[in-house]
């Protein structure tokens, strides 16, 4: 049986851990990020509001909640809503083909009494009408993560897919500079035609320009594990001399057992454009060489804080870009997982605060 002293020690330890988590949440700022104004981009320290002046209702629209990226964003939104003292309604449009569904969800949420909207747009050019209508109703909008072409938004908070592709390309270009032996790469950026995939493409090809990297084939496909595994199998069958498989996190995760089964894990290396729990574990277990990482959780916190700033006329930065990097097996220990990934126990939250 535990004695009183042990119980007290356990309680004290639990209290310390709770305080540590609380302190960690409170101390995510100041965060260095890019702020663009009048065409000039500067790195600035960002700190959020201490509290909202009232429990505003903010609608948050995501393209989907099917992968760890948007689960991490959902986690960041909810944690910042707790800290600021506001209410949120989170919407899942169902996927990157569901533009009309995203528009309907936003319209319904606005009609239901939203004070502001945070929108991760499915289509850069497809949201103009709904954004114009929201502006007429004096409902401010934060253009988040993917970006839109419309000018009817109040603040932009982006994690540029182009920059993620660029960082992956630059990582390879630095490792294999021009003039060296050609390095053969298969490129699997995701579903053809999706805006984020086109951005991945543009950034990656810019990054490998003037290097020894050669893209021997590009394979497009849905970011489901079955589809990505099939694409990887096709590539391994077609190209017997591949050096790298580069692309989405789902591709990298799917490729690990396939390479191991063919005894190719030491020959064909894996590079993911972004981070997921599976990729993070792959880096630690040395089955994945490198992966890009954007602070998704913190970006989501800034998205919600920006919505509150718009409502309270306290905006300091109207065009924000959070900073990412590439982590390898050798430095993955430096990654702070809680800035990039939701906790393993976290489940999607669609309503927080109020009824």
Image: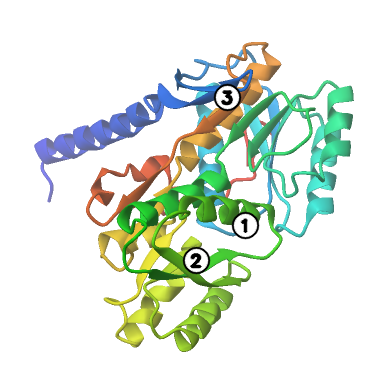
Residue at the spot 36% in from the left edge and 29% down from the top edge? 22
**Is 283 left, or right, of 105 in this rendering?**
left
Please name which of the two marks, 2 or 1, marks the residue nearer to the observer. 1
Residue at the spot 26% in from the left edge and 59% down from the top edge? 284
Q: Secondary structure at mark 2?
A: helix
In this rendering, the answer to whether 295 lies above or below 56 is: below
Mark number displayed over residue 250 = 2
Q: Secondary structure at mark 3?
A: helix
Q: Secondary structure at mark 1?
A: helix
Q: Gap between marks 3 and 2, in whole Å? A: 30 Å
Along the polypeptide, which appears first: circle 1 or circle 3?
1
Residue at the spot 45% in from the left edge and 67% down from the top edge? 214
Residue 353 position within the rendered picture, expressed as x and y whole percent measured from the top left: 62, 32
Q: Gap between marks 2 and 1, in whole Å? A: 14 Å
**Is 334 left, or right, of 353 in this rendering?**
left
Along the polypeptide, which appears first: circle 2 or circle 1?
1
| Most foreground residue, 55 or 197 | 197
Please name which of the two marks, 3 or 2, marks the residue nearer to the observer. 2
Mark number displayed over residue 197 = 1
Q: Residues within 10 Å of mark 2 (few under 14, many from 20)?
A: many
Residue 63 position within the rendered picture, expressed as x and y whole percent measured from the top left: 68, 51
């Amino acid at each position: 049986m535990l004695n009183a002293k042990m119980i007290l020690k356990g309680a004290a330890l639990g209290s310390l851990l709770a305080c540590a988590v609380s302190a960690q949440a409170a101390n995510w700022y100041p965060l260095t990020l890019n702020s663009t104004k009048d065409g000039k981009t500067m790195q600035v320290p960002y700190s959020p509001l201490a509290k909202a002046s009232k429990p505003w209702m903010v609608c948050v629209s995501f393209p989907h909640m099917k992968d760890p990226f948007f689960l991490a964003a959902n986690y960041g939104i909810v944690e910042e809503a707790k800290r600021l003292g506001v209410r949120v309604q989170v919407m899942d449009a169902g996927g990157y083909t569901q533009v009309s569904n995203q528009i309907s969800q936003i319209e319904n949420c606005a009609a239901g009494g939203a004070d502001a909207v945070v929108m991760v747009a499915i289509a850069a050019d497809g949201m103009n009408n709904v954004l114009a209508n929201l502006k007429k109703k004096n409902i401010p909008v934060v253009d988040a993560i993917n970006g839109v072409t419309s000018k009817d938004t109040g603040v932009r908070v982006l994690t540029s897919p182009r920059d993620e592709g660029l960082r992956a390309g630059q990582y390879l270009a630095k490792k294999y500079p021009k003039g060296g032996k050609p390095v053969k790469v298969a490129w699997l950026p995701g579903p053809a035609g999706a805006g984020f995939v086109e951005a991945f493409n543009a950034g990656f090809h810019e990054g490998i320009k003037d290097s020894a990297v050669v893209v021997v084939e590009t394979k497009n496909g849905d970011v489901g594990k079955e589809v990505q595994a099939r694409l990887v199998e096709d590539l391994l069958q077609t190209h017997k001399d591949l050096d790298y498989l580069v692309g989405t996190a789902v591709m990298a995760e799917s490729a690990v057992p396939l390479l191991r089964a063919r005894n190719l894990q030491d020959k064909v290396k894996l590079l993911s454009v972004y981070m997921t729990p599976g990729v993070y574990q792959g880096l630690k277990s040395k089955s994945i060489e490198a992966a890009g990482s954007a602070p998704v959780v913190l970006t989501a916190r800034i998205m919600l804080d920006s919505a509150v700033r718009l409502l309270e006329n306290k905006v300091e930065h109207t065009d924000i870009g959070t900073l990412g990097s590439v982590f390898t097996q050798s430095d993955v220990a430096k990654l702070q997982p809680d800035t990039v990934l939701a906790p393993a126990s976290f489940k999607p939250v669609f309503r927080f605060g109020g009824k």
